[in-house]
Amino acid sequence: MSISGKSVRIASGQGFWGDWLEAPVRQVEVGPIDYLVMDYLAEVTMSILQKQRNRDPSQGYARDFVPLLGRILPLCVEKGVRVIANAGGVNPLSCRDAVLETAQAAGLAGQVRIGVITGDDLMERLDDLLSQGVELRNMDTGEPLTMVRDRIQSANAYLGAGPIIAALERGAEVVIAGRTTDTALTYAPMMFEHAWPADDWDKIAAGVVAGHINECGAQATGGNTGVDWQSIDYSDIGYPIIESHADGQFIVTKHEALGGRVTVPTVSEQLLYEMGDPAEYITPDCTADFRTIQLEQEAVDRVRVFGVRGAPPTEMLKVSVSYLAGYKAVGTMTYSWPDALEKARAADRTIRARLERLGLGFAEVHTEYLGAGACHGPLAGPLPPDLPEVELRIGVKHSERPPVDRFTREIAALILAGPPTATGFAGGRPRVQEMVAYWPALVPKKQIEPRVSVEVA
Amino acid sequence: MRVRLLQVAHARSGDKGDTANIGLIALKPEFYPVILKEVTAERVKRHFKGICQGDVERFELPNLVALNFLLRRALGGGGTLSLRTDAQGKTLSAALLRMMIDVPDELADLLER
């Protein structure tokens, strides 16, 4: 199905679970696209989804995805737009069932095929893998997984493009994945449409670069840019669209009618976002060299990307394990002029002294003064003499919940039994949060067998 | 001529565990040799004294007139474990742009902001 001279338009609709709900709708409504790809899974998201599944076995996927498809699927079918998303989380099959139901309710019975990818979830296989000598050591610290074995909340291998391409080959109009790499959502349809061989490293590397540009939504099209941000219309910002050509070159653009901006600076910023060693951007399908990327402003809001070189991937897949690492809570209180900062500091001393007397033994107590250098600390330089207000923000960590719960009672006590002009406590007691830590590891590819199933609504 | 890095470059930062990354991009190609010379890993480590507890590594991307910095142990334990407001290092890009650097006088006309 090679398309020469013609391009395939792959639109990003979501950069994380919690991103702008209207973005994917606008991508489908406002102009022509061939694919809508949506990334829902950050590292921490998997553990949240696992907790939801533990409470209710029918949950554990990005729930927003289902009503979204209810809104856009009829138009996608009419326009021939295929949807690829890692909305399946830790329960892709239940996500698929919910989508099938929604498609039928939208009057699309018999008109749309839903593909689902499984095989990334290693939760039930961990002991088996460990007994086979797959140690799943922490890539950063070298520690063996047995150190946190009893606290693990989720464990997923990052799958590549293979299973997504398999689902597309079988005619799926909607592909639901669990833990795939964010970039594969974009380069899988590129490989499929252009029939790129699985060992054409340069072309796949170009696809990886396209995926990296797409994976954070509007961060490539003017969102969060530091260059001339004042002139950007964010309210109806256009999310990125990749126009992919068979030779590997592609254009980054957006719907003309929407806001935002696509320039060499906006694309460059996104290319460097969460970058490690640019010479070795490792994915399951190739290793891309980001030092070979060439950018050219071809026209207004159109950046051409070319020259990308790639190399074979490794024999390993990345695994993301999450485990419970204790509890935390953060409380805030605002103090007004005069002497706002001094009052906030006195309040901090007060809380710390009260906690000290309780002997709760926190692993960490951390204080910041918002409005007085919380973000940049000493780099912010000398503060203006008497600030109009300052927000005290104090947080604690503990391996057990009760001490953290006790801490949350100490914030409101400042209102009557602390420095003057305390305000801004209407939100009530701070919430105790479970701290979920992230354990990056590697697993041999041969241990992972993705499965693909496609069903007609 | 002494100017703020903000006048010759833009930046974006993000996180991977307890490591922050800062991509620093020259606003004009003429400024790339300037940031290459001025914004060394050692200088960035000193700049972030008290914030970055680990080492700083620098990578060069001349194709994007950019540098990439990895700041290890810079996020108070990492995204989900950190008690900081900026647990994911989103504002470290701006913090880097506070740095004062030397720019050759002949490039003065190219300075915009």
Image (spheres, coloured by chain):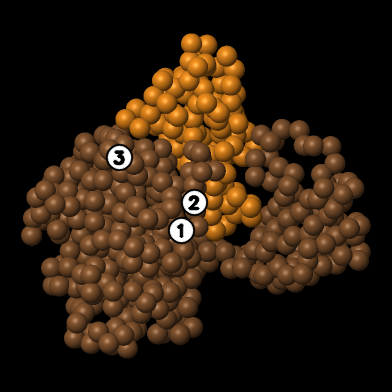
Chain colours: A brown, B orange
Write down the residue under mark 2: A233
Q: Chain of mark 3?
A: A
Q: Are marks 2 and 1 on the same chain?
A: yes
Q: Is residue A181 visible?
A: no
Percent x, y for residue A420?
91, 57
The secondary element bearing badge 3 is classed as: strand
Give the amino acid at mark 1. Answer: Asp
Q: Is residue A305 visible?
A: yes
- The Cα–Cα distance between marks 3 and 2, rounded to whole angstroms, is 19 Å
Percent x, y for residue A304?
26, 40
The secondary element bearing badge 2 is classed as: loop
- The Cα–Cα distance between marks 1 and 3, rounded to whole angstroms, is 21 Å
Give the amino acid at mark 2. Answer: Asp
Vertically, is A28 above or below A233? below
Vertically, is A234 above or below B100? below
Write down the residue under mark 1: A236
Give the amino acid at mark 3. Answer: Ala
- The Cα–Cα distance between marks 2 and 1, rounded to whole angstroms, is 7 Å
The secondary element bearing badge 1 is classed as: loop
Crowdedness of circle 1 by 10 Å Cα count: few (<14), some, many (20+)? few
Residue A295 falls left or right of residue A248: right
Asked whether disc 2 touches disc 1, contact meaning CB atoms under 8 Å apart, the reply is: yes
Percent x, y for residue A227?
49, 38
Asked whether disc 1 touches disc 3, contact meaning CB atoms under 8 Å apart, the reply is: no
Q: Nearer the viewer, residue A79 or B92?
A: A79
Q: Nearer the viewer, residue B104 or B77?
A: B104
Vertically, is A72 above or below A273? below
Write down the residue under mark 3: A299
User: Nearer the N terminus, badge 3 or badge 2?
Assistant: 2
Q: Nearer the viewer, residue A265 or A123?
A: A265
Q: Are marks 3 and 2 on the same chain?
A: yes
Percent x, y for residue A257?
37, 55
